[in-house]
Every structure is written in structure tokens, then in C-alpha cells.
Amino acid sequence: MPERVIALDIGSTNVHAGLVDTRRCVCLFRSDFPHDHLSRQLAAFIDRIKTDAPAIIGGGHTGLAQKAEKILKKKKHQSVIRLQWQSRQTRLPVRFNYKNLSALGADRIADALYAAAMYPERNVIIIDAGTAVTVDAVSASAKFTGGVIMAGAVTQLRGLHAAADTLPAVALPAGKIPFPGGSTVSCMQAGAAHGIAGALNHLVKEYKRFLGGKCTVLVTGGAWHLTRKLVDFDYIEVPDMTLIGMGLYACYLKYSASPRL
């Protein structure tokens, strides 16, 4: 079983690359870059970490995943696997209760594996905030319960502009989210950020009721900063959760020994 795994999470906008220590469940080095910088930045990342560790690729962009795999193999990384649902999933320590498992996103699988590894025998609520915001849970008995998918703040703003040309194209502010809004722009910004925060507050309460016990809330994702000061529940922020979970997946799937469980 390898102690280190290269994890590539190909998101909707950016690629997240990390060198994961699967024994300690930490990301040793990370690089984030846009899709159109994949060739140059991934090659630079591999040169920087100086290892022939196995690699795992996840995300919904098949073309970019194929391109990344070619770059890795050109750099002498012959062991490259994809994070996708398959029959060998029985080795995973989490039972996934989900209809059409092939449609379950790689990031949600990875986040669930991290939650189970780091918080065994505890109810864990997982919030992953990006282009979409997902809210899932892993029960104390290591069962993935499914959850919620909703549009992220940027996606909401783009959707409003696309649906009504009287509403402007709006970016989110770098600083404090306005409330209440005093203009069309600030009203849209407030609606997106505070709306998501309100939904998360409700969903965490519902999950605690559903799971019937104390819950640990884990959060990750590049858009979490938009709502971190607007929610009213305690949480633990883990920026590298998906990358670490992908590294764990590689070990569970490819090797007989488990890194943590």
C-alpha cells in the first residue's frame, strides 16, 4: 500500500492537484489552476513533488481527465486510476445508499470516505461549496445517506442574468456580503449568499433530526468563504478534504490493506 498518492480533482472551473499522505490523511502539497493551464501547471506540479507515486483522477470532465492521464504517464506515472463507481466498490468502508450509483459524483464519494476515516462511529454532515453546494451525511454506522444538491452563489447569479436580461451580470464582492441590499446588484449578491446560508442552517438542523444524534459538520470547497460567517452552526473546515478522500479511495480500491480503517 502506498503512503503517498497524487490526487487530481477536476472541478467545473479549476483543477485541484494534491500529494496526499494516506497514512496521516493529510495533503502534503497542493496546486490549483484553471482548466486551460492544465498541461503546463500539471507538469510543473509533478516536477515539484518529485515522486512516482500512483495517481487518481476524479471529476466530471472526461476530456480533461484523459489529457491529465496522458501527462502523468508521460512523466512516468504508470499507475493511474479514475475515481468512478464500479463493481469492486465492495472494498470501501462506507455503504452508499444511493439510486444509480454511477451518477454519484467523485467528490461526494471522496468526501464521504474522508468523513468515515477521520470520524469513525460518528454522525458526520458534509458540506461541499463550489459551483454547486452539496450537503451529504455519513452515519455513525458508516452509511452514506444521500443529501442535497443546490446551485452555488455564482451559479445562482449567472442563472438570474441568463433568465432575465433586466438583471445584470453580477460578481460576488471580495469583502462583506451586503444585507440588506440597496441596489439591484447588492440585492442579488445578498440573495445568493444569505439564501445559501439560510438553506444550510435549515439542512443541518434537518440532518441532526434525521440522524438522531450529535453530528460533526465538515465543510470544504472554494466558495465556502462566502457563507462561513453567515451560518449559525459549529463546523470544521477541511480545505483538502476531497483530495485526501480521493487518496483514500485509491488505497481502498487498488490495495488490500486499508490506510486508516
Image (cartoon, rainbow, N blue to C red):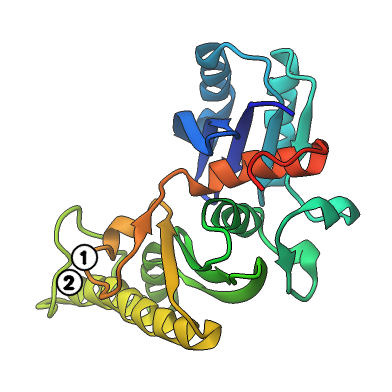
Please provide percent x and percent y for residue 149: 54, 73
Name the amino acid type tagged 2: Ser
Q: CA distance from mark 1 to mark 2?
A: 17 Å
Q: Where does the N terminus fall, quadrant-wise?
A: top right
Observer-nearest of 6 and 74: 6
Q: State the SS at label 2.
A: helix
Tell me which residue sits at (51%, 85%) in the image. 212
Foreground: disc 1 or disc 2: 1
Tell me which residue sits at (9%, 78%) in the image. 182
Name the amino acid type tagged 1: Lys
Observer-nearest of 140 and 179: 140
Residue wearing tag 1: 229
Q: Is residue 243 visible?
A: yes
Question: Who comes first in sequence, dot 1 or dot 2?
Answer: 2
Residue wearing tag 2: 186
| Location of residue 123 with respect to 84 vertically, above or below | below
Q: Is residue 155 visible?
A: no
Tell me which residue sits at (46%, 82%) in the image. 208
Please provide percent x and percent y for residue 68: 67, 30
**Label 2: how many Cα within 10 Å (few below 14, some 14–19, many 20+):** some
Observer-nearest of 102 and 155: 102
Left/right of residue 77 with respect to residue 200 in the rendered view? right
Please provide percent x and percent y for residue 74: 73, 15
Left/right of residue 215 with respect to residue 228 in the rendered view? right
Left/right of residue 245 with respect to residue 178 in the rendered view? right
Q: Quadrant of residue 120?
A: bottom right
Observer-nearest of 184 and 77: 77
Left/right of residue 145 with respect to residue 33 in the rendered view? right
| Location of residue 115 with respect to 190 vertically, above or below | above
Q: State the SS at label 1.
A: loop
